Amino acid sequence: MKKWILAVALLAWIPLPVSAQTLADRVVSHTLSNGLRVLMVERHQVPTISFRIIYKVGAANEVNGMTGVAHLYEHMAFKGTQTIGTKDYPAEKKLIEQIEQTYTALRAEEGKGIMADSKALARLATQFEALQKEAQNYVIPNELSEIYDRNGASGFNASTGNDVTTYMVSFPANRLPLWIAIEADRMAKPVLREFYKERDVVLEERRRSVETNPGGKLYEDFLFTAFAAHPYGFPILGWPSDVGSLSATETESFFKTYYGPSNTIIALVGDFKADKVIPLLEASFGKIPTTPPPPPVVTVEPPQRGERRVEVEDEANPQVLIGFHKANLHHPDDPVFDVIDALLSMGRTSRLYKKLVVELKIAVSVSTAGGSPGARFDNLFTLSATPRAPHTTKELEDALYAELERLKTEAPSQAELDKVITNIDASLVRSLRSNSGMAGQLAYFEAVAGDWRYVLRNRDAIAKVTGADVMRVAKKTFIKKNRTVATLSPVENGMGQMEDER
């Protein structure tokens, strides 16, 4: 399910005990003097506040040679500032500059290839390691997290996606000034300390998530095959060669381009008074200098001319992943895909579960997603399934296509549509009663759709989807030349048997 879109659309109907107002009436929207957008919802039932900071930058804003930089910067944002995470910043700063100068020289020498001076390489590598070791003497590890822990923080985390980068935390309400002071400092004066050490951590994360994870390999190759031009084909964790060559200088330049106030959304939900918070935010975040708008993503994925297929071989259970190109969240047909998504795979009464898992017994699991790998740009409707032995991915493919064909020829009844909408409402409203959930959703849609009210308009649009709409969109979208198919196949030896792990 495209949970972000459907979930938040229901927020206007979440009971708010202290008022009968709808969400549209309760959200206070304010733009600081430097262009930073703030969304606030007061909820005084519990003395806590949940915070979200979303930057409108992700893997889709990267270019070849610098893939993975957004995710790497997310890691660096936890390293502290000029006042947090350091014993002596002026002394540390000099060493950081020397480290960067040495790395630049080392990379330049390595770039000479076979003409590189081996003695110069050895000298620079030794100097590089020595400077990093010396810089460690000034680092206070994990000071930022420890400050938050001591002050009752929960859910302190971050995530990088294709469309946005999100930082989240919840605090007791009386720690609001602390959050403002630290996060404004983190936005204005980040320090890329331990950069090359953390770069190795990110490469190890990639090894765990992709290179030794069959499912990760399949999804990465699937996206790379589906998107020949658009950066949605880039892995969020980056290509290994790109990440392994990123410098602190390049990463800092990326930060200055994309992490300015006008490219940032902040959401607060909880026990506070909005009119009291706005001056505090203006006095802290508002003082951060504004920056020019970042460059837009101009590449558009060209129409696909025929089916694309990719096979990944690994010592793993087989799996099939199918994607069909579709428009972004602003297209009037996007709500129809939400309904199709729910019809096919929402719960044990969904069409695919009943047909493939229960009736035919050819699948262990099956799922769909209405917008992968992002929503901001034209994306994919995807179907994923794992066969039940001894059935094959080919059998699953044929069964999935049969259900898609059914969507083209048999309109779902109004009763089935009503059931889907009711189930979506019930499950997602329950999941969004928390301050944290509401803050995340509001900030996300303000960033991706340009207006958090999109969620209200989208819910209305979903309710108006008809069986004829489903048939029309299915006929236009679920066609062979518009699809990409990725299969995960077990590695076999010469005897036709899966190889034993060694």
Image (cartoon, helix red, strand yellow):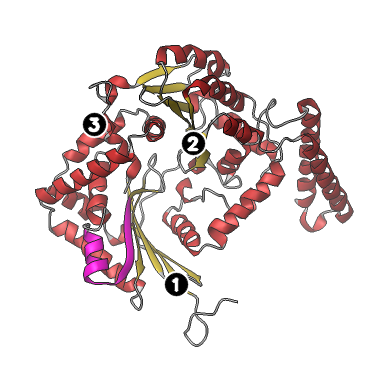
Cα–Cα span, label 3 and label 1: 46 Å
Q: Earlier in the sequence, mark 3 or mark 1?
A: 3
Mark 3: amino acid: Trp
From the image, state whether disc 2 or disc 1 is nearer to you: 2
Crowding at dot 1, Cα within 10 Å, few <14 / some 14-19 / many 20+, comes out as: many
Is 290 on the left or on the right of 319, as rendered?
right
**What residue sits right under mark 1 in the picture?**
489
Mark 2: amino acid: Thr
Whether 364 is among the magenta residues is yes
Crowding at dot 3, Cα within 10 Å, few <14 / some 14-19 / many 20+, comes out as: some
Between 477 and 77, the one nearer to me in the picture: 77
Whether 84 is among the magenta residues is no
Assign a secondary structure to mark 3.
Answer: helix
Looking at the image, residue 391 lies above or below residue 339: below
Mark 1: amino acid: Ser
- Can residue 329 be seen from the camera position used here? no
Looking at the image, residue 469 lies above or below residue 409: above
**What residue sits right under mark 3 in the picture?**
13
Cα–Cα span, label 2 and label 1: 35 Å
Q: Earlier in the sequence, mark 2 or mark 3?
A: 3
Looking at the image, residue 451 lies above or below residue 391: above
